[in-house]
Image (tube, rainbow, N blue to C red):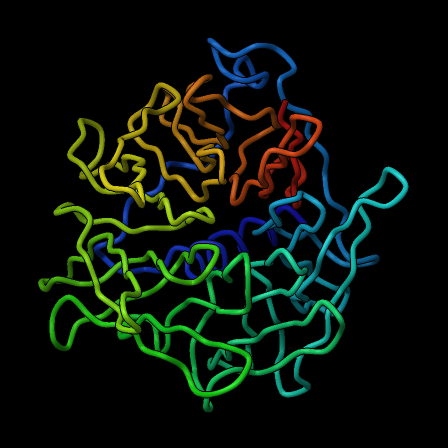
Amino acid sequence: MKSRALSLFLSVGVLMIFGCDAGQPVEPSLSQADPSLAKGGPTASIGFATLAKLAPIKGGGHGEAYAVDQAGSVIAGYSWDRNGRMNPVTWRLQSGAWTITAFPYAATATSAVARGVNDAGDLAGNDFPASSPHPVLWFSAGGFALLGCSDIGEVQAISIGGQTLAGGVGAIGSRTAALWRPTGCREDLPLLVTGGTSSANAINGNASIVGGTASIGSGISVPVRWTLSNAVWQIEQLDNRPGSVYGSNPAGDLVGSVQVSCGSAPSCSRGMIWYAAGGSRELGTLGGESTTPRAINAAGEVVGLSSLSDGKGTAFIWSESAGMRQLPVSGSAWAFAVSGVRTDGTRLVVGAGGKPFSALVWTVR
């Protein structure tokens, strides 16, 4: 099962989630993390986070957790079944245990994946009929809808307060950022340059701010923000360095990474926050040279992957008050999403990794 996990992480986790555009940030290594840092890093308190593994479909293989709602009640992702198919799933806490539920998809597809969840429990993602993925919305009440007008594309996010999905349409390498809704055809977002490419990876609560990446020529893509004003979308380049936006909170604060020069590799990633109110902030690392944020919550807390001083990467959570902290795990892991701060003062961080490889959830105090 370990070999299948590594294969999935390289072929699906990297290609589907991060893309293969030459302008995309370089990700830190996912090799074994330093066990001496497994309780939260050299400056973090012991026991600030508790890790739990999320079980796959019975009889199937591993899975990955890609999204969590603000309340921390629904986790979304995928799980392999015993027939070697990816299934969109949710995990919900029932009687003290996380219970998995698989969702249906079109009979013409071979697999499907959920990458986003809104506060109503609707799921966003896409299926995989042959090499032509279709955007899909799964309704919390049951059933699903293939979106758009015979579109080929992948979905990366859904608005927390509604049913607007963000992603890219077209083949990898020639994609255009697009939005889908339960009815009607897709809406393409403007480009930075005529004939360029783009992809939308994040969307805020009321679907008025979208984040992603867009090309500026010569194979270089930069982080961008689309803002809806008077029913017209405007695109804004957020940084001159190659990179991408990957996550948004309800207010429209965006997180992502940019490429910078570094000593040990042609380029490294630096984590960034771009605030909806204006301005930006560069995040640190866990002692290494790279950080790639994946999500930000309403409290401004950021999660993702960061490298250690030995260059190996592992999951982190960052906050204004506590700084960068390594999340406990045996082996290495990604953190893909974070809930809001719950009534008991905790928040959930979800991702994948560990030994053996599986979907993960951390309860962070």
Query: Quick check: 292 above or below 42?
Result: below
Q: Residue 145: image x %, image y %?
A: 61, 81
The residue depicted at 35 percent of the width and 58 percent of the height is 209
Residue 346 appears left or right of 274: right
Most distant residue in the left direction: 218
Task: Choose top left, top right, bottom left or bottom right for residue 141.
Answer: bottom right
Name the foreground residue: 301 vs 23: 301
Marks counted in the figure total 0
Which image quarter is the C terminus in? top right
Most distant residue in the front direction: 230
The residue depicted at 53 percent of the width and 44 percent of the height is 337
Name the foreground residue: 334 vs 275: 275
Q: Residue 164: image x %, image y %?
A: 49, 69
Residue 361 appears left or right of 101: left
Name the foreground residue: 82 vs 151: 151
Query: Quick check: 285 above or below 353?
Result: above
Q: Residue 246: image x %, image y %?
A: 38, 50
Residue 79 appears left or right of 188: right
Q: Residue 45: image x %, image y %?
A: 57, 10
The residue depicted at 58 percent of the width and 51 percent of the height is 67
Most distant residue in the bottom direction: 150
Name the foreground residue: 45 vs 41: 45
Task: Choose top left, top right, bottom left or bottom right for residue 276.
Answer: top left
